[in-house]
Amino acid sequence: METLDHLLFGFQVVFQPLTLFACFVGVLIGTLVGVLPGLGPVAAISILLPATFHAPPVASIIMLAGIYYGAMYGGSTTSILVNIPGEAASVVTCLDGYQMACRGRAGVALGISAFGSFIAGTIGVVGLTFLAPPLAAMALRFGPPEYFAVMVLGLTVLTFLAGGSMIKSLMMACVGIIIGNIGLDFITSQPRFTFGTDILLDGVGLVPLVMGLFGISEVLLNIEESLTTRKVFETRLKGILPNLQDWKESIWPILRGSVLGFFLGILPGGGAVISSFVSYGMERKLSKHPEEFGKGAIAGVAGPESANNSATAGAFIPLLTLGLPSNAVMAILLGALMIYDTPPGPRLVSLRPDIFWGIISSMYIGNAMLLIFNLPLIGLWVKILRVPYPVLFPLILLFCLIGVYSLNNKTSEIGLMLLFGVLGYLMKKFKFDGAPLILAMVLGPLMDKSLRQALLMSGGSIGIFFESTICFILFSIIVVLLVLPLIPFVGRFRKRVGEAEEQA
Amino acid sequence: MKHQDQYASIFWFILGGIITFSSFYYGVGSFSKPGPGFITFLAGAGLTILSVILFVLSRSKKEDRLSLKQLWVGGQTGKAFYVMGLLIVYMLFVVPSGFLISTFILLSLLFRVQGNYSVKNTILLASLSTAVSFIIFDIWLGVRLPRGFIGYFIF
């Protein structure tokens, strides 16, 4: 009952005109970002982050969250109509979604994807509503050793689930920790790795880093690959509403995908991507006609699309309750909350209930808005798909330049962004994943703090990390995760996920 | 032919080594009294060790073996470098020449990187984008964009 009261308070926050408008803008941009291949939610949120500094924190964070879950809706449109995933979590939707389109059922595929996303998104938010507060209360008992263990686990899980080489991901995590600890030491105020410059005294800014790594580098690669126009499925869309038979075939995949996606989303590391893959595999195994998968099975669209939307709600749980991001988008949101002077964690619910419950309530509203956008406005999204990249990329670059300059009105920030742009470009060339770097960069100072506090508390004994049951369990999981990729089956699954992310 | 990961691992090995040794300069401390360089020492050492492992593993890797040159074959790398060059020049000149002039020139050049638009259309697109972005960011959102020398006459 208390939770429902808080939820009602959250709705009061969301129904403020400015907040409601922010939610609308967020999901609108999110859908747009999802529709456009070559621009993911990470890049979009990082590009728009500086623009939110002039708005109230609640509205800003609701808008940024809206971009994240909105992109999951939009991603399916591109997968179904163009056979190119708008973002990584929609890769599997291409398999059956595009085949449905080829059979003249593009409308139904888009329809079931939108309805499935709405149902799953709402189920995910219900889970978030009831699970987040007790978890936040439990997290209040965490001390520095537990926090350090949770952060190491977060990084390990992310490197494990990120796909591709785990060694490379761990290397990027190390680089992220180093970058995150540039600037003044929190105990002695001694400058570290600042090279005598003032610009690095406050540390490397999150905005130039993410804009460079994800925005600039993405544009450079797209230019290199001559991404110009996309061939959009030309058949006129009809029959967006699924019939009874479609619903019969889809309802269980949607419900299973929702539950699966939510719990996988809580785990650190690409929850939306993993959950869509697992959901597709599960539906194919459970189906009476597995041979139809890959040839236009509606369950192959409904399950994964539901799973990836539900996962976005799950991903908010570690951020809101522990203050720990589970993926790159959440890491940027964590950075944003810190910039707004509201560090998330177990105290967020009591210190800033407007933000905590505002975000949760906004997701109910946002999901409803997305259903409205995605069905009647599908024609508009198809038209946007035809915007040529030669027009789009200069505008993306312009947003990056203005955004990063507006932080401190210094061109040195632009220089930093360009530097990370080149680094991100090279990292993609050499197949190094940027997500562990971002996560470690955000967690770096927190890890430094909790590690040193824990060691000071114990008088230098590392036994403190194994004394409590929570720490012991967490470190045991870390060890298992580091060994697990050596098992061939697990290695193959990670490779498939890595390939999917690369393809997107 | 060397695997591309070998080149990458050499780069990260050198960087990791520099970070590890620089951490001593800031003070690594001890387990009972960790210093400012403690965590960067651990991360730098981790990076160094992992880059050695990557180097060793990539030596035995037969598949996906590409030389440095092959990594850039087939794409229009020149255009990517050209765009990066434009952005660097923009960074250097945006303050003295002002946002309006420098952005207009930058966009005019960028729109022509991949598009086959006429000069008239390019100018139209560039001036429209510059004006709209100035109105949104400077006038509405209050971001103080650089005025440059033109600012002395207009603003």
Image (tube, coloured by chain):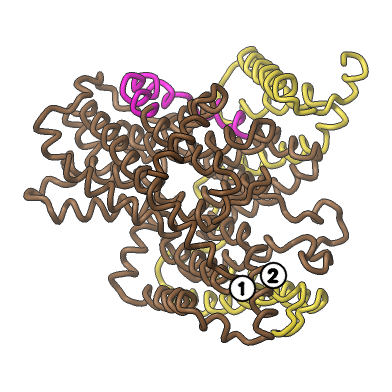
Q: Is residue A211 above or below residue A496?
A: above
Q: Give the x, y percent position of residue B57.
A: 48, 77
Residue nearest the observer in this picture, A276 or A326: A326
- Considering every residue shown, the one lying at the far right of the view is B152
- Residue B120 vs residue A220, the one in the foreground: A220
Report the residue marked by disc 1. Answer: B47
Between the C-alphas of marks 2 and 1, the distance is 8 Å
Where are the magenta residues, as a range? A369-397
Q: Colour of chain B?
A: yellow
A239 relative to A168 in the view: left or right: left
Q: Which percent across, then down, holds residue A35?
A: 41, 32
Of A312 and B126, nearer the camera is A312
Quadrant in the picture for residue A377: top left
* Residue where numbered disc 2 is placed: B15
Circle nearer the N terminus (2, 1):
2
Q: Which chain is brown?
A: A
